[in-house]
Image (cartoon, rainbow, N blue to C red):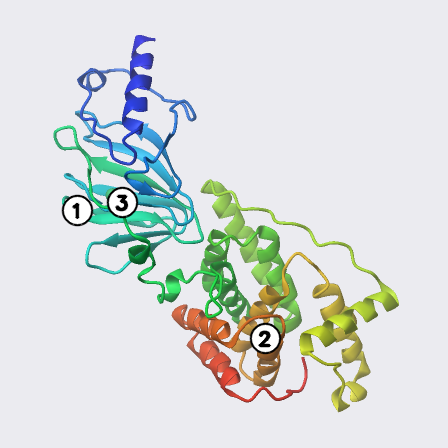
Amino acid sequence: MRRARKGRATLAAWALAACAGMLGADPADAQAAAQEIVRAGVQPPAAGPAEYFTGRVRVDPAWPANDEINASGGTVTFEAGARSAWHTHPRGQRLLVLSGVGLTQEWGKTVQVLRPGDVVWCPPGAKHWHGAAPTTPMSHLAVTGTLNGRNVDWMEKVTDAQYDADASNTERTTMNADQRLSRKHQAIPPIAAAMAVGDMAQLGTALNEGLDEGLTISEAREVLVQLYAYAGFPRSLNALGELMKVLEARRQRGLKDAPGRDPGSLPTGKELLALGTANQTRLSGAPVHGPLFDFAPAIDEFLKTHLFGDIFGRDNLDWPSRELATVGALAALPGVESQLQSHVRIAMNVGLTAPQLRSAADVLAARGFREAAGRIVSALDKPLANAPGR
Ligand code: MN
């Protein structure tokens, strides 16, 4: 009992020093012969002090340094935009990213993006900061060596200018400017392209990134459901199987993905045809007709009732996301350039800008879909004339 109380007091004290404590070894603990378990939730969290952190930061202490292992450990959770001040560690520090998207920078070098599973070594004396991405929280385990009872030397705050300095880097593009896609929207084209070509390894990576960026399970699933209309049932079914695997693996890693919402109900029969026709007209900017649809009226009815009614009528995925998915999938498929061009135009009709679509192409190129990226750029560079088919 005495030991437990002492342990609690010690942890509470060092927690206040945030991701770096002022505490050294505890000889009493070091001599303990019996195993000890400190139960989850027992150690109180602490807020990262405003003098050392910008934004909301929570520190959950895990263990103090002792004689055997001269490094403290704790989980630090940064809300979106939050970060540490510049600092050094006299004995160095290891960071293991647990969730979200983070940023870190060493003095004089460029900002680096951190994702779950990334491990950072901060050598002794290297001036650096770490924190969350502008629009996404980040949590990391920090294991920090101790020298003469100290494990951090704090310096000046990271200014907004320093934090935003690397904003042109598409890896950390944020959502607000017309020129940029939100991180969540950026995640969709690579999912779509990987699904369309049936590359399950790329798809798994892209789905993980999308979920990390805040795509709900419902949204990720809906992208893959919708794309059956563009890439076929076999690709869609394989991709949905991959999503199930990704979600199960993430559950086992302790990640809690938001389920999102189910779509509302839709009309049937003539009302569905009317809804789909209205959706198609809104998306395309004008009623859609032509000799192809006179020649094959069934495909016209399927497009109107099923694609633009049944699928685009589902309200669990916004239309810009649906168009980013369609553009990403069509871009990855050779021979459907005219449909890609139609959907580049539709994407703009639902509010996406040409620079945002160029940034979608940049994201695809960065993920290795260079031909797909080139097709989007070609479609953007062409005059936006009517192209056949949808
Ligand atoms: Mn550090």
Q: Disc 1, ligand 1: is the CB inside 8 Å?
A: no
Where is residue 201? Give x, y as percent.
45, 62
- For discs 1 and 2, the disc positioned in front in the rendered view: 2
Residue at x 17% of width, y 46% of height: 123
C-alpha distance separating marks 2 and 3:
41 Å
Q: Residues within 10 Å of mark 3 (few under 14, many from 20)?
A: many
Mark 3: which amino acid? Ala
Q: Disc 2, ligand 1: is the CB inside 8 Å?
A: no
Mark 1: which amino acid? Pro
- Contact (CB < 8 A) between labels 2 and 3? no
Q: Earlier in the sequence, mark 1 or mark 2?
A: 1
Q: Which residue has dot 1 on it? A: 123
Q: Which residue has dot 3 on it? A: 85
Task: Please tell me in which quadrant of the rendered image residue 168 appears.
Answer: bottom left
**Front one among 73 and 332:** 73
Task: Please tell me in which quadrant of the rendered image residue 314 appears.
Answer: bottom right
Q: Earlier in the sequence, mark 3 or mark 1?
A: 3
Q: Earlier in the sequence, mark 2 or mark 3?
A: 3
C-alpha distance separating marks 1 and 2:
48 Å
Q: Residue furthest top?
A: 2
Quadrant in which the N terminus appears = top left
Q: Residue furthest right?
A: 270
Where is residue 358? Give x, y as percent.
46, 75
Taking the image in four quarters, ligand 1 sits in the one at top left
Q: Which residue has dot 2 on it? A: 348
Residue at x 26% of width, y 48% of height: 129
**Front one among 227 and 44:** 44
